[in-house]
Amino acid sequence: MTKKAQELKVLLSSPKKIVITTHKGPDGDAIGSSLGLLHLLKQLGHKVQIITPNEYAEFLHWLPGNSDVITYDGNEVKANKITNEAELIFLLDFSHLSRISTYADTIKNSNATKIMIDHHQDPDMDIADIIFSDISSCSTAQMVFEVMEAMNMTKYLNKAIAECLYVGIMTDTGSFKYASTSAKTHNVIAELINTGIENDKIHDLIYDNSSATRIQLLGYCLNEKLRLYPENNSAIISLTEDELKKFKFKKGDTEGFVNYALSIKGIKFAIFIAEKDGIVKLSLRSKGGFKVNKIANKYFSGGGHMNASGGVSEYSVNETIIKVEKILNKYKSELNKSK
Ligand code: 5GP
Ligand code: MN
């Protein structure tokens, strides 16, 4: 870390044009780490633009600096121009260019020095010049804090940085409950809270600020769309585009639904399937040693972490359910192991 941090510190010692990007369908960690870094870099005198591949959930829009973000989708000409002029590009919370979809070619062809900060498995070491990769880390937001520490820059920590990094760490740790939540995580959180941020307000804005239709959609999922496979310790929840429409679906509304299936006693593998904009997406979650990233990678062109992954299906929602059921049977013995 130290040598790379030194290299980065040198790069940041004179004002630069900088782009920060993150993965498609940005989540709390993607946006929190990007905005946290933006607030640091701006204090250092850099010109910074965050470009996300596409839009993200409204519950993240209150974050400081949100209005500085542009999406690649719909702003291609402007985004390409800014990216081509950038001297440094930060790649946050992803480790393969396929994760930034149509923006990938522009990033690949840019001559900027690229810096990856990420906690996903098997990073592609060819896509960046300086790589901070820690697959044991709970979040990219925590890694951004650690890179700041390694560069001796915690003196720049302020409320804006702290709020953004807090959201990244909180959302990627399931509010500090996943195994990846370490003593270090709590130490970092303590330093963030010491800036004076209101942690209760942040939890409220992220988790307790839903539309009524979102909560009704959750009720519908749990009452009518939950399929249990006790013989395989698994559960599936699925939604078609029509069902989402009925509940006035907005981006982010189904975030966290998969965890309700996983919270049922005995369930070790939970699958959430939803059709959005004609694409059938899967969220896979597990408890214990069952590696859902292997399933996501092998069957659904996806990936992620051992206990939290995602991917896409080329089939309809109903066909995807059948495919998943076959997978559950195939992995029956693994799913019935005690750990
Ligand atoms: P979610 O289920 O919340 O969409 O995603 C959970 C995790 O799975 C994400 O943090 C990300 O690491 C990974 N993930 C989700 N979708 C994809 C995908 O399409 N491809 C890959 N490689 N990883 C994904
Ligand atoms: Mn993350």
Image (spheres, helix red, strand yellow):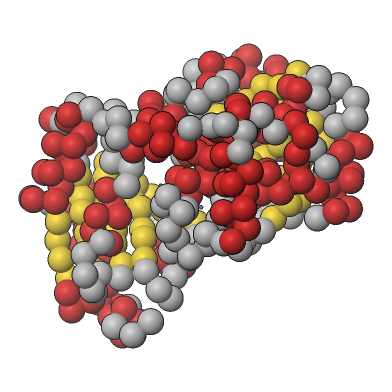
Image check: 160 left or right of 152? left
Residue sitting at 73 percent across and 22 percent down? 42
* Residue 297, horizontal then vertical, whole percent: 47, 61
Q: Residue at x 34, y 31 (%)?
A: 251
Residue 233 screen position, x and y as percent: 24, 74
Q: Quadrant of residue 72?
A: top right
Give the total of numbered labels.
Answer: 0
Which residue does the image show at 18% across and 43% down from the upper left? 218
Q: Quadrant of residue 107?
A: top right
Please indicate, yes or no, whether residue 97 appears anywhere in the rendered image: no
| Residue 314 picture location, percent across and down | 34, 50
Above or below, comparing residue 323 to residue 32 in the picture = below
Q: In this image, 163 relative to 106: left or right?
A: left
The quadrant where residue 157 appears: top right
| Residue 98, horizontal then vertical, whole percent | 57, 45
The quarter of the rendered structure image containing the C terminus is bottom left
**180 to 241, vertically: above or below:** below
Residue 10 seen in render: yes
**Image point (58%, 54%), residue name:** 185
Seen from the viewer's position, the closer of residues 203 and 125 is 203
User: Image check: 248 left or right of 95?
Assistant: left
> Which part of the image, by quadrant, shows the N terminus?
bottom right
144 up-or-down from 66: above or below: below
Query: Looking at the image, which residue sits at the far left?
Result: 224
